[in-house]
Amino acid sequence: MSGTLTNSYTNSPPVTILGYAKTLITLRNMGGGSGATYQVQANPKTNDSLAPWVTIKSGTAFYSGNVVTHKLTDAWEAIRVQGMNTQSGFNASIVVWANVDPR
């Protein structure tokens, strides 16, 4: 996910992680100003419309230039990241990388 965020959550495209032992999610705030909020969400079954997206990691003080990394080891089918701008008059932009390690 990369781009200018609004003052409401924007979703990244989902990434399938089922079949991998570990997933490393790295986020970097590339925008100006002093903040963004993010949530890493996971889904147990993406082709089931009743399966919920569950927030498993989050951060609220994600400042410009900051980098955060989360290691995931649970057996979710897919993950996505939500990002939101938190400072009026500035644009937050988050770049997300997802690296997976085979079982």
Image (cartoon, rainbow, N blue to C red):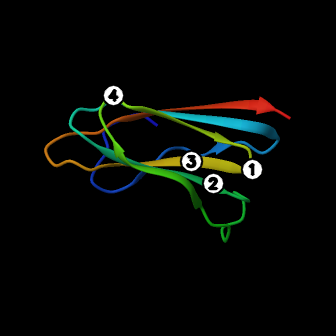
**Residue at the spot 34% in from the left edge and 46% down from the top edge:** 61
Q: Are marks 1 and 3 in contact (CB under 8 Å)?
A: no
Quarter of the image holding residue 100? top right
Label 3: how many residues lie within 10 Å, few (<14), some (14-19) or many (20+)? many
Label 2: how many residues lie within 10 Å, few (<14), some (14-19) or many (20+)? many
Q: Are marks 2 and 1 in contact (CB under 8 Å)?
A: yes
Q: What label does residue 30 carry, if any?
A: none
Q: Is residue 55 left or right of residue 36?
A: right
Which secondary structure lies at badge 1?
Answer: loop
> Of the residues under marks 2 and 4, which one precedes in the sequence?
2
Q: CA distance from mark 4 to mark 3?
A: 21 Å
Q: Which residue is tagged 2?
A: 42
Q: Amino acid at mark 2?
A: Ala
> Of the residues under marks 3 and 2, which one precedes in the sequence?
2
Q: Is residue 65 left or right of residue 73?
A: left
Q: CA distance from mark 1 to mark 4?
A: 29 Å
Which secondary structure lies at badge 2?
Answer: strand
Q: CA distance from mark 3 to mark 2?
A: 6 Å
Q: What label does residue 65 carry, if any?
A: 4
Q: Which residue is tagged 3?
A: 80
Q: Amino acid at mark 1?
A: Asp
Q: Amino acid at mark 4?
A: Gly
Given this view, does label 4 or label 3 mark the residue nearer the observer?
4
Q: Above or below — where is 51 with respect to 70? A: below
The image position of residue 39, as x and y in percent, is 48, 52
> Of the residues under marks 2 and 1, which one precedes in the sequence?
2
The image position of residue 37, as x and y in percent, is 37, 49
The image position of residue 72, as x and y in percent, is 67, 43
**Residue at the spot 73% in from the left edge and 51% down from the top edge:** 77
Given this view, does label 1 or label 3 mark the residue nearer the observer?
1
Label 1: how many residues lie within 10 Å, few (<14), some (14-19) or many (20+)? few
Q: Which residue is tagged 1?
A: 74
